[in-house]
Image: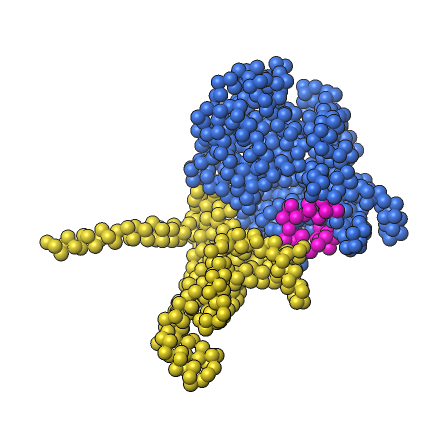
């Protein structure tokens, strides 16, 4: 055990050193392979593909929206290379889709091309993409994809989407460097060690809390009197998390004359509420000794009925009493609104929350937002070995969410122009703009978005965009710590992932609503998963699942 | 041979309709039956034949039967209320109450709305966080967690459906009332001097064929309802407000399980056909 502990600590330190620029990539690769990291981070080991080298310019007159830029790109743009070319892109009707719409006219201005953007609600996005592809219609050149759609792109013998590595080698396209992506995020853009996605969004969930409320001496005294220990700011274990949520539920701690809440969630079915459960359940099952959350990699039998999952669900259900019951019918934005209105102390969610908090027209909490990785457990169940293991602290990172980004259709007749537009948005100037503006919904997943010394960004850069310095430090540091945690919850990317997750979505919702017992719900999920696996083919699913968790055969 | 020419001309005129039915009714039905005996994987198409496995799967699925039950409750309650309210309103307007022209225009407006839009509107109207309907109903003591419980969600969907479709029954009934001779009303009113009695014993029997057709059309439409309840609750919490149409949509269109989805569709078609046949028989008996 001691040996494994060492190995994990070394891996964590190694990743941090790499992303803080203290060691070179070559050095990192050599030391990582000695530690056996290769399997866990296959995306890092794809061929280095950037063409620019050190030949970059800060700006060019022909490209007012790109920085840095290669001389070849500047020359290429002089002739408006995509004049007369129209590309069609399907995006999610959401903030990340709005970000694409923002960049479209800028790309058109630089290249002479035209981009048509079709917005589709999240509930039908997967269906619309795969209808377009499987029927051979190919009406779209680019799809803004959720990372969990990946498996479905690779069901046919010839995948539905094309790799982008050849484009990366050509300096006429807008400059962006996949090596700047955090490994946990880059994995989601990669399939079988080949990069298919172009940098855009990088989702992960961390815990946001009200710094002022948890650090208030009056609240601290009341909490200690009631719970018998100091009010943790932030909560670090699931027990503390529940205690804090319970303590702040049902009384007027913000002095507005109305009772307030301990926690905000959103849990409407067919939305994204199930990610809350996936995130909060992780430390009950995932640990340095086990990375199997979904299936037994040898048999492809579901693990969802394990004691760890059961305890996770039973604990998760308790949270429903810490917020308005309406949370069961809330979509994502409605969950955020409770926190932004200053009526909830805690919210485990995506990075949109602190960015939206900066907009004082809709937020009462600017400057008051604390952030921390999702609380851990002191006990985690290994469903393969069938036993609980104790830890001082078992913290698990996650990349839960869509990490929405563009992929190029195999059926596209304008693949170069399509890639050009995606790379344009991935260019540092545009990516940093997106990350620092809440309305874009784009989360940080590149080195230059994190504050020094963890990354290369400066506080000034964020302050220029209207950020409160305290909020941005809390947010980016917690996000970074979550992403470099060597213990990560595995992300389900096999074919049918949307269907597997739908079963979790509706069954967990039924438990939250008190319509089903937790054990029964998990058994129903397991039964449904078995049918899905059989339909797709157990052997194929097993092979893809094993690959997705870093098992080679 | 003018006879032969005539015959060909008739065939020619019929051809578009026949082709339409073949393409958009017969072919999809045959394809659905074919899919229902197959295993289908998106991206690969039919990957094998599974006999009656899909049907066994459907018939033993608690979720399927739950969705059928929810659909029945939704249909019976919503259409029942629409008929009662629609006929009552039509009678009131028919009596030429003051302001009836304005009222007639207003009451038909919901008919021109889209189900999905009404569903999304319902989310704000029934929200316990300041939703207009939730607030007004709370003023008269009806405090329901509308969208976070099965009963609340289904009730909200039914109320919105009633709001939207009552005008359909209203319009048809009003037209039916207009077709009944004024002399009949006048004679009955002279005899009874009671509008309720005239309605009960004169108007209603004569309206039966018209209302039956309206009822049948609404039943068929309501069994297929999708947009409004889906936009309002997405079938949740859990699957508690999941109508058959929602379940079939998710299975077939969202997750591309054409095999199981088609088996569900065929099974539901049989169930609904039984209901409609019984309804027709009853209706014929009543009218005869």
- Residue A227, position as x, y percentages in the image: 86, 51
- Residue B77, position as x, y percentages in the image: 52, 66
Q: Residue at x 76, y 25 (%)?
A: A453
Q: Can residue B228 be spotted in the picture?
A: yes
Q: How is the image coloured?
A: by chain
Q: Is residue A234 left or right of residue B47?
A: right
Q: Which chain is yellow?
A: B
User: Which quadrant would residue A474 be assigned to in this image?
Assistant: top right
Q: Nearer the viewer, residue B162 or A196?
A: B162
Q: Can residue A39 be spotted in the picture?
A: no
Looking at the image, residue A204 lies above or below residue B229 = above
Looking at the image, residue A304 lies above or below residue B111 = above
Q: Residue at x 47, y 56 (%)?
A: B112
**In the displayed image of the protein, which residue is found farthest to the left?**
B1
Q: Is residue B22 left or right of residue A5?
A: left
| Residue B280 drawn in magenta | no
Q: Is residue A410 left or right of residue A19?
A: left
In magenta, the rendered stretch is A316-342
Quarter of the image containing the N terminus of chain A? top right
Chain A shade in the render:
blue
Q: Nearer the viewer, residue B177 or A48?
A: B177
Looking at the image, residue B144 lies above or below residue A336 = below
Q: Main secondary structure of the magenta part?
A: helix
**In the displayed image of the protein, which residue is found farthest to the bottom?**
B191
| Residue A328 drawn in magenta | yes
- Residue A248, position as x, y percentages in the image: 79, 51
Q: Residue at x 51, y 65 (%)?
A: B78
Quarter of the image containing the C terminus of chain A? top right
Q: Nearer the viewer, residue A381 or A151?
A: A151
């Amino acid at each position: 055990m001691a040996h494994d502990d060492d190995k994990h600590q070394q891996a964590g330190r190694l990743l941090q050193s790499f992303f803080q620029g203290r060691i070179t990539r070559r050095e990192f690769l050599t030391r990582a392979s000695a530690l056996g990291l290769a399997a866990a981070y296959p995306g890092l080991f794809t061929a280095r593909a950037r063409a620019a080298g050190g030949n970059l310019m800060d700006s060019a007159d022909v490209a007012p929206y790109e920085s840095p830029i290669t001389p070849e790109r500047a020359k290429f743009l002089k002739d408006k290379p995509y004049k007369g070319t129209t590309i069609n892109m399907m995006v999610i009707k959401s903030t990340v889709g709005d970000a694409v719409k923002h960049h479209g006219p800028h790309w058109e201005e630089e290249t002479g091309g035209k981009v048509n953007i079709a917005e589709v609600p999240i509930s039908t996005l997967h269906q619309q993409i795969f209808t377009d592809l499987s029927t051979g219609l190919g009406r779209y050149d680019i799809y803004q994809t959720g990372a969990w759609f990946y498996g479905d792109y690779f069901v046919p013998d010839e995948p539905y989407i094309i790799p982008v590595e050849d484009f990366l080698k050509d300096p006429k396209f807008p400059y962006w460097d996949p090596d700047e992506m955090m490994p946990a995020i880059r994995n989601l853009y990669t399939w079988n060690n080949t990069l298919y996605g172009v940098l855009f969004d990088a989702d992960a969930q961390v815990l946001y809390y009200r710094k002022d409320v948890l650090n208030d001496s009056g609240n601290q005294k009341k909490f200690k009197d009631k719970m018998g220990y100091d009010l943790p700011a932030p909560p670090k274990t699931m027990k503390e998390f529940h205690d804090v949520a319970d303590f702040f539920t049902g009384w007027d701690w913000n002095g507005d004359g109305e009772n307030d809440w301990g926690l905000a969630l959103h849990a409407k079915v067919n939305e994204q509420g199930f990610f809350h459960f996936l995130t909060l359940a992780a430390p009950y099952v995932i640990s340095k000794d086990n990375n199997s959350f979904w299936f037994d990699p040898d048999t492809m039998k579901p693990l969802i009925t394990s004691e760890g999952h059961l305890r996770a669900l039973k604990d998760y259900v308790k949270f429903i009493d810490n917020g308005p019951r309406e949370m069961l019918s809330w979509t994502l934005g409605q969950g955020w609104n409770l926190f932004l209105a200053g009526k909830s102390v805690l919210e485990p969610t995506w990075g949109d929350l602190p960015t939206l908090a900066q907009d004082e027209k809709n937020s009462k909490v600017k400057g008051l937002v604390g952030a921390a990785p999702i609380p851990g457990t002191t006990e985690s169940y290994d469903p393969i070995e069938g036993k609980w293991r104790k830890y001082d602290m078992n913290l698990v990172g996650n990349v839960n969410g869509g990490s929405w980004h563009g992929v190029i259709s195999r059926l596209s007749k304008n693949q170069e122009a399509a890639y050009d537009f995606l790379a344009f948005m991935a260019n540092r100037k545009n990516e940093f703009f997106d990350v620092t503006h809440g309305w874009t919904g784009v989360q940080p997943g590149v080195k230059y978005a994190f504050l020094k010394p963890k990354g290369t960004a400066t506080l000034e850069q964020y302050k220029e965009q209207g950020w409160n310095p305290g909020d941005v430090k809390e947010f980016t540091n917690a996000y970074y710590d979550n992403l470099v945690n060597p213990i990560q919850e595995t992300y389900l990317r096999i074919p049918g992932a949307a269907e597997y997750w739908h079963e979790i979505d509706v069954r967990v919702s039924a438990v939250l609503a008190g319509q089903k017992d937790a054990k029964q719900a998990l058994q129903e999920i397991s039964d449904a998963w078995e049918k899905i696996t059989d339909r797709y083919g157990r052997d194929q699913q097993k092979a893809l699942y094993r690959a997705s968790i870093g098992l080679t055969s | 041979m003018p006879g032969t020419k005539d015959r060909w001309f008739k065939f020619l005129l019929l051809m578009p309709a026949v082709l339409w039915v073949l393409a958009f009714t017969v072919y999809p039905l045959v394809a659905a039956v074919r899919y229902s005996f197959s295993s289908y994987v998106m991206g690969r198409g039919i990957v094998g034949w599974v006999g009656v496995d899909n049907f066994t799967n459907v018939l033993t699925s608690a979720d399927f039967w739950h969705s059928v039950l929810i659909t029945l409750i939704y249909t019976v309650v919503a259409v029942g209320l629409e008929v009662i309210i629609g006929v009552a309103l039509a009678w009131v307007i028919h009596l030429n109450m003051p302001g009836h022209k304005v009222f007639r225009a207003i009451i038909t407006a919901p008919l021109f709305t889209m189900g999905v839009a009404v569903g999304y509107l319902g989310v704000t109207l029934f929200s316990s966080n300041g939703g207009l309907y939730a607030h007004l109903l709370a003023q008269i003591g009806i405090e329901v967690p509308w969208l976070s419980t099965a009963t609340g969600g289904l009730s909200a969907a039914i109320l919105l459906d009633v709001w939207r479709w009552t005008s359909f029954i209203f319009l048809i009934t009003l037209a039916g009332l207009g077709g009944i001779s004024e002399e009949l009303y006048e004679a009955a009113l002279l005899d009874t001097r009671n509008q309720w009695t005239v309605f009960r014993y004169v108007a209603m029997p004569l309206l039966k064929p018209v209302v039956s057709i309206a009822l049948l059309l609404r039943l068929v439409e309501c069994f297929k309802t999708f947009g409004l309840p889906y936009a309002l609750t997405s079938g949740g919490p859990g699957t508690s407000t999941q109508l058959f149409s929602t379940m079939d949509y998710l299975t077939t269109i969202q997750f591309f399980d054409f095999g199981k989805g088609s088996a569900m569709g065929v099974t539901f078609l049989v169930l609904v056909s039984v209901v409609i046949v019984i309804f027709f028989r009853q209706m014929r008996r009543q009218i005869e």
